[in-house]
Structure formats: structure tokens, C-alpha cells
Image (tube, grey):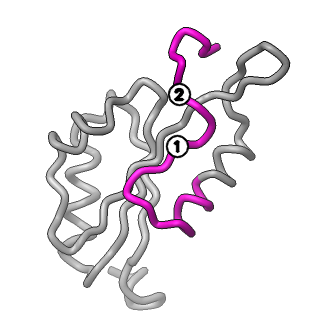
């Protein structure tokens, strides 16, 4: 790959994959796993995603540290709103810095308070 020749092996992937892209995770994981040593996948997921169920369904390569970042919502003055682009970006950066297996940006519960 030309990228790797110029910049080195890929070590970090941030993937926001929507539910209608059924095979995207597998394809990304396979391609990166074949050419990387050890790498980190930060998988961005929507507020309704079941993290435990999803993690069991995915095949994560042996040389990959898999992290889930769940997007939530914000409560402000008795109202709820979805996250802004800036909040999402800053949250993902924070998740990468922390390196926890799961990280939530905003809140996902109580479900009935979502916008």
C-alpha cells in the first residue's frame, strides 16, 4: 500500500459505520489486520446500539485492540438534544486518549429522555 510506504503501518482506525453497511467492519478489520502489527479500532456507535451484543457478533482480529465509543445525547435546562459535531469529535479524541474498552459521549439513559 502506498500509504504505508510513505507513512508506516496503520496503528489507529476510527470507524463510524452505519447499520446498513453490513460488511464494512469485517472488510476494514481484515485489510488492516493483514498489514498492521498491533493496532487499535475505535468503533463509533449510535445511542441505541447494544454494545455487548454487537461485540459478540463482530470478529475482531487478534492483533487489534477493539474499543467502542457510544454516542448519546445532552440534557440541558430540562431539554434533550443530540450531540454536536464538535462534541462528537472532542469525545472521540478523549476516548482515544483514555483507551478504555467502552466510552460514552453524553448520556444514553434514561432512554425516554432522548430527543
Q: Position of residue 67 (x, y in %)?
A: 37, 57
Q: Residue at horizontal 73%, vertical 36%?
A: 84
Question: Which quadrant, please, contains the C terminus?
Answer: top right
Q: Residue at horizontal 31%, vertical 60%?
A: 66
Q: With respect to residue 18, does 43 lie above or below? A: below
| 70 vs 35, nearest the viewer | 70
Residue 104's mark?
Answer: 1
Q: How dense is the environment of label 1, judged by Cα within 10 Å: few (below 14), some, or many (20 and up)? A: some
Q: Residue 39, located in which quarter of the rendered image?
A: bottom left
Q: Position of residue 50 (x, y in %)?
A: 32, 30
Element marked by disc 1: strand
Q: CA distance from mark 2 to mark 1?
A: 8 Å
Residue that badge 2 annotates: 108
Q: What segment carries the magenta color?
A: 92-115
Q: Residue 5, located in which quarter of the rendered image?
A: bottom left
Element marked by disc 2: loop
Q: Position of residue 42 (x, y in %)?
A: 42, 57
Q: With respect to residue 46, does 2 lie above or below? A: below
Q: How dense is the environment of label 2, judged by Cα within 10 Å: few (below 14), some, or many (20 and up)? A: some
Q: Position of residue 23 (x, y in %)?
A: 22, 42
Query: Would residue 91 appear left or right of 11 to someone viewing this image?
Result: right
Q: Residue 1, located in which quarter of the rendered image?
A: bottom left
Amino acid at each position: 500500500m502506498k500509504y504505508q510506504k510513505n507513512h508506516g503501518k496503520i496503528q489507529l482506525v476510527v470507524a463510524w459505520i452505519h447499520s446498513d453497511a453490513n460488511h464494512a467492519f469485517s472488510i476494514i478489520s481484515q485489510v488492516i489486520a493483514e498489514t498492521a502489527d498491533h493496532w487499535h479500532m475505535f468503533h463509533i456507535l449510535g445511542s441505541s446500539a447494544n454494545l455487548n451484543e454487537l461485540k459478540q457478533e463482530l470478529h475482531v482480529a487478534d492483533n487489534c485492540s477493539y474499543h467502542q465509543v457510544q454516542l448519546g445525547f445532552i440534557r440541558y435546562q430540562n431539554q434533550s438534544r443530540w450531540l454536536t459535531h464538535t462534541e462528537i469529535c472532542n469525545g472521540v479524541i478523549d476516548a482515544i486518549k483514555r483507551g478504555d474498552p467502552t466510552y460514552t459521549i453524553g448520556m444514553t439513559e434514561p432512554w425516554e429522555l432522548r430527543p
